Image: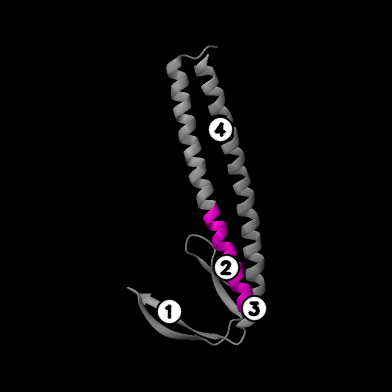
Amino acid sequence: MSLTLNKLEDLHTQLLQDLEMYERQLQRMNAEISEYHQLKSTIVVIERDLREGFKTQVNVGANVFMKAKVPTTDKILINVGMNHYVEFSLEEALKFVDFRIRVLTKQNDVIREAIIKTKAKIKLALLCVQQ
């Protein structure tokens, strides 16, 4: 089966669009993984240093802050997706965060594989166009 030059160019364009989509997905995943690593660090600090509670400032909207006191840090709320929050003990929260990091890392690996395959297809299409 022989491909015409137009079909090869269309294929090349489609592959470039796919590659761009995969790279955007990879960036989003990396950002989410980074957020979970930050959350894990925060939980560790709370466990280690802030067991007795702490004082903070809370943004109540329009960059207006008010003082707040957190009397106990036994439990925290974590956004588990689609703006649904679940209350976890600190130990449970660490387990959940570790699980999410593992899942997201595996999804990242799948996307990286798709990027590698797409780049290989692009190179193949370019070689066909050159001939």
User: What is the C-alpha distance between the residues marked 3 and 2?
Assistant: 12 Å
Mark found first going from the N terminus, 3 or 2: 2
Are the residues tagged 2 and 1 within 8 Å (C-beta)? Answer: no
Does 19 sit left or right of 6 as displayed?
right
Q: Nearer the viewer, mark 2 or mark 4?
A: 4
Q: Amino acid at mark 3?
A: Glu
Q: Is residue 85 magenta?
A: no
Q: Main secondary structure of the magenta part?
A: helix
User: What is the C-alpha distance between the residues marked 4 and 1?
Assistant: 46 Å
Mark found first going from the N terminus, 2 or 4: 2
| Residue with the mark numbered 1 | 58
Q: Amino acid at mark 4?
A: Lys
Residue at the limit of the structure toward the front, as seen here: 130
Q: Magenta region: which residues?
A: 30-46
Q: Amino acid at mark 2?
A: Leu
Q: Quadrant of residue 119?
A: top right
Q: Nearer the viewer, mark 4 or mark 3?
A: 4
Q: Secondary structure at mark 1?
A: strand
Q: Secondary structure at mark 3?
A: helix
Mark found first going from the N terminus, 4 or 3: 3
From the viewer's perspective, is residue 114 above or below residue 67?
A: above
Residue 88 in view (yes/no): no
User: What is the C-alpha distance between the residues marked 2 and 4?
Assistant: 34 Å
Are the residues tagged 2 and 4 within 8 Å (C-beta)? Answer: no
Q: Secondary structure at mark 4?
A: helix
| Residue with the mark numbered 3 | 47
Q: Amino acid at mark 1?
A: Val
